[in-house]
Image (cartoon, rainbow, N blue to C red):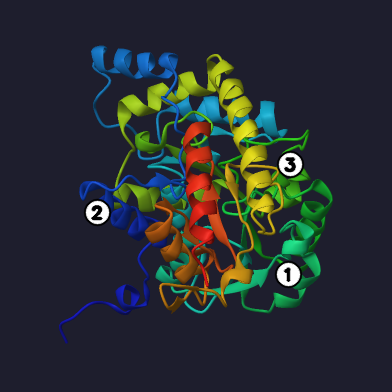
Amino acid sequence: MLGISERAANMQPSATLQLTAKVSEMTHAGIEVIKFNIGEPDFDTPVNIRNACKKALDDGKTRYTPAPGIVELRRAICDKLERDNNVRYGVSEISFGTGAKQPIFNTLFMTVNPGDEVIIPTPCWVSYVDMVKLCGGVPVLVSCKEEDGFSLDIDAIAAAVTDKTKAIIINTPNNPSGAVYDEASLRQLAELALTCRFYIISDEVYEKLIYDGEKHFCIASISEEVKALSFIVNGFSKAYAMTGWRAGYVAGPADIIGKINGFQGHSTSNASTPVQWACIEALNGPQDSLKTMLVQFDERRKYLSRRLNEMGFSCKTPKGAFYVMPNISALFEKSYKGKKLADSAGTAEFMLEAAHIAVVPGEAFASPNNVRFAYSNSLSNIEKGLGQLDAALKQLD
């Protein structure tokens, strides 16, 4: 019978990309929208990284590479993981892909069978759920408590484990909440994984964006036994302002990484060749640009959290990434132009229409009482956008 596949029928489009399209329509209509919905640094890629890419082009490094990436890059990734995360990998345990999304999907596709359950703590990044579904797996959502700063709830995770549990996906620092999972909870999670035998897929793409003296802890560094169950995913988009370059990787057990590489060879083959050489410079070159970004992100983080609380929202100051997740449920009984806001999607729609600011509704992250603001925008734009929101709130009935 002709028609789309069951996978396609079960897939939901990315809510963040849909919102971006709507904002684009308004912009083309001449309406200025302050974009709190975009999860990418508003800084240029550092000059040394751009120059490394240009040099690769000038040197003729534009041909196919091995599907998992050039050896020089995979060796640089191994050095980074040992230097920053205290965990040792060999080049055969690294797969480099097109952004961090591809390595996450490849890992799921190579480990999850139809009917396998994958635990996902929420709030969670928008694509995890549909990635699991596309692999035939069953997403099992476990809430992290807002009053605890969205930290991992190990008891709730343990209660969700069944004999069908194949993996858990964690994201620290977290998109969308900004939570940084502490070492104690990650050690508890590792013990649970060892006891119940499931994989840990740890998305650490925001690893470098941490504030208030918090420390990132890589779960694979606990022991060789934990490392054998772990897949560490990271990328270059956030720390090095390289979102459009599409560069990310996964480190894991050599046998499964080999299958991931084989799958990538049948799907996309290698990621962009000159980009791979630029990524070596990102890892091994000066890190001054990251420090500059962190100072500005920190200033924006504090201002945004403070102003949202002053406007009557409940908003914890996050410890990582570049997002805040205020609770906006107090608005659900209010109305704008005779229409009740009702939920976070309706509240986000009101903010777009009345305040001309774009935020992402919490439903996209399995957190229906919240919306996500990204502070990857200039402080002047943040101030302007919040001023417009403050004025719009006064129009509610």
Q: Is residue 85 above or below residue 311?
A: above
- Residue farthest toward the bottom in the current orientation of the protein: 1
Residue 216: name its quadrant: top right
Helix, strand or loop for disc 2: helix
Which label belongs to residue 25? Answer: 2
Residue type at mark 3 is Phe
Say if mark 2 contacts mark 3, CB within 8 Å. no
Residue beneath disc 3: 217
Residue type at mark 2 is Glu
**Residue 94 image position (x, y, % from top left):** 51, 39
Residue beneath disc 1: 157
Query: Taking 49 as reference, is 78 left or right?
Result: right
Q: Earlier in the sequence, mark 2 or mark 3?
A: 2
Question: In which quadrant of the rendered image does the N terminus lie?
Answer: bottom left
Seen at 38% across and 38% down, the residue is 246
Helix, strand or loop for disc 3: loop
Q: Please name whichever residue, 170 or 257, is drawn nearer the observer in this view of the structure.
A: 170
Point out the frontmost of discs 1 and 2.
2
